[in-house]
Amino acid sequence: MSTTAPFETLTEEYDGWYEANAGAYRSEQAALERALPETFDHAAEIGVGTGRFAAPLSIPVGVDPAKTPLEFARDRGIESVRGVAEQLPIADDTLEVALVVATLCFVDDVDATLSEARRALADDGVCVIGTLDCSSPIGQVYEEHKDENPFYADAEFLAASEVCDALKAAGFELEGRWQTVFEEPATLEAPSLEDADVREGHGEGLFAVIKARPTP
């Protein structure tokens, strides 16, 4: 992974975004829950950051190259492992779930990242991607103004359709797509997880979720 410097030096600011934008955060969590299996034991989040998604979604292990965010994740009960997405410190065929949230825009190599997720997953495992969809109306605004944000200045935002194509190329078949955050994140009121506005498909919501399984 690249572009870790802001996450090392501005960790509290990054982590605080989820409190300041609780409506978007809860909506994103609700969309991810649609894609996750009801039960699992062996799961990891690739690009876990401060553990804001891994903890409430019961993902026990998190991998990230940035040291300081991992300390936050560890405080949230996540087994935190320092490593990069393109060379995961995870054995072959061991994961039931590989979760990748708001990470693909920061990695050095998207194809290698997804290939590593495929390698680490068991044949009946599931890969769940959460991504900021630059083809959505709000995503286009993010793209236009990313240089003004210390976390996104060096990000390479992807369209959800590009992520779907990359998953297929890495040996996955798509199983479901969801989207949420249809307004500016700061304007959203915090819903209950059950009442969050989560719709199927992608292209309208800023936050897109894609569920995929290894191709037999």
Image (cartoon, helix red, strand yellow):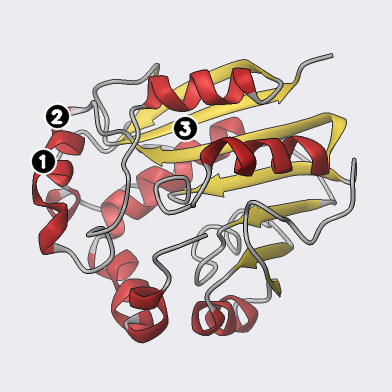
Q: Which callout, 1 or 3, points to the residue nearer the camera? A: 1
Identity of the amino acid at label 3? Answer: Val
Q: Residues within 10 Å of mark 1 (few under 14, many from 20)?
A: some
Q: Is residue 72 left or right of residue 158?
A: right
For the residues marked 3 and 2, what is the alpha-carbon distance in whole angstroms? Answer: 16 Å
- In the picture, the disc for residue 137 is 2
Graded by Cα atoms within 10 Å as few (under 14), some (14 to 19) or many (20 or more), the crowding at tag 2 reads some
Asked if disc 2 and disc 1 are in contact, CB closer than 8 Å, the reply is yes
> Which sits in the foreground, 212 or 87?
87
The x and y percentages for residue 172 are 68, 21
> Can I make out residue 199 in this image?
no
Q: Secondary structure at mark 2?
A: helix
Of labels 1 and 3, earlier in sequence is 1
Q: Residue at x 38, y 81 (%)?
A: 11
Residue situated in front as seen by the camera: 1 or 51: 1
Can you give x and y, in whole percent of width and height, for residue 215 in the image? 77, 16
Answer with left or right where residue 192 lies relative to residue 206: right
Q: Which mark is residue 209?
A: 3
What label sits on residue 141 in the rendered view?
A: 1
Say what amino acid the circle numbered 2 marks. Pro
